[in-house]
Amino acid sequence: MVELGPPIASGRTADIYAWQDNQVLKLFHDWFPRESIMYEATIARSIAATGLPVPAVGEVLSVNGRNGLVYERLDGSTMFTALTRRPWNVIHYGRRLAELQVDMHARSVPTGLPGQRQKISHKINQAAGLSPQLKQRALTALARLPDGGVLCHGDFHPGNILITPQGERIIDWIDATSGNPLADVARTSILALGAAASAQMPGILPRIWTRLFHHAYIRRYFQLNPGGQAEYLRWRPVVAAARLSEGIIELESWLMAEAALCEYEKE
């Protein structure tokens, strides 16, 4: 039995522990498939090869009967933590998130990434809360939206940005795809606006800060990548329908209302 000490952080799929040689061990829960861990390691190495600011990835190993993945240890805290500690910097952080995402969308796409459209379609089909009619509307709206061929993170939000003395690092690339950048922006919007509209962000002031953050983020993104605002708004209800597959109870009513904005099928 390896003595790990208390976890540095804990998430839905894994716990993070200090490891040897300035590394951390991402130790996955028993239910998480090993093939998904191998896939994460492969994707992490491919993303690092693009030159984006990401932590280096090490080996997949077994510790105390659980599968784990070794990463470079980075000192710092997430952008989300920085926001909660220094909310007066909310505009700066919103703009910075957009700048990082614009840089990401300009990079070459690593080989082997899944297609974004197929992933969103699968999620919509898996969304148990969607009625058959609304599910079909979402799929029809998705079919009308254009493909893309840029590197998309798939879960780009302040909790996945580490602020370190060496600069920001983007983490958690398991949902990366090759796709339309405006769908990626819509996903970030749905994450932020959903948090501001639900019990995920309790209290009036945090909700106001979250909306200010989102406004600064969107404004900066389209300053750097002009055009596309109308298409981005068409992606938002489709992405909301896909997010319903993630089973977040406190968000379901808000996501359902957003998904209902999917365009009707034209006769």
Image: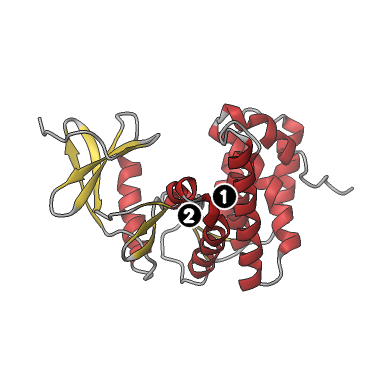
- Along the viewing direction, whichever of 40 and 218 lies nearer the viewer: 218
Label placed on residue 139: none
Q: CA distance from mark 2 to mark 1?
A: 8 Å
Q: Secondary structure at mark 1?
A: helix
- The residue that appears at 32% across and 54% down in the rendered structure is 76
- Along the viewing direction, whichever of 87 and 66 lies nearer the viewer: 87
Label placed on residue 114: 2
Q: Determine which residue is flagged by label 1.
A: 118
Left or right: 129 as drawn, with respect to 75: right
- Along the viewing direction, whichever of 37 and 200 lies nearer the viewer: 200
- The residue that appears at 32% across and 55% down in the rendered structure is 42
With respect to residue 182, does 119 lie above or below? above
Q: Secondary structure at mark 2?
A: loop
- The residue that appears at 20% across and 52% down in the rendered structure is 23
Amino acid, disc 1: Gln
State which quadrant residue 29 falls in: top left
State which quadrant residue 56 falls in: bottom left
Left or right: 192 as drawn, with respect to 38: right
Quarter of the image with the N terminus in it: top left
Left or right: 3 as drawn, with respect to 137: left
With respect to residue 88, does 13 lie above or below? above
**Residue at the right extreme, as displayed:** 267
Please provide percent x and percent y for residue 244: 61, 35
Label 1 packing within 10 angstroms: few (<14), some (14-19), many (20+): few
Please provide percent x and percent y for residue 208: 64, 45
Amino acid, disc 2: Pro
Q: Is the Cβ of the residue at disc 2 closer than 8 Å to that at disc 1? A: yes
Instruction: Please count the marks in the image.
Output: 2
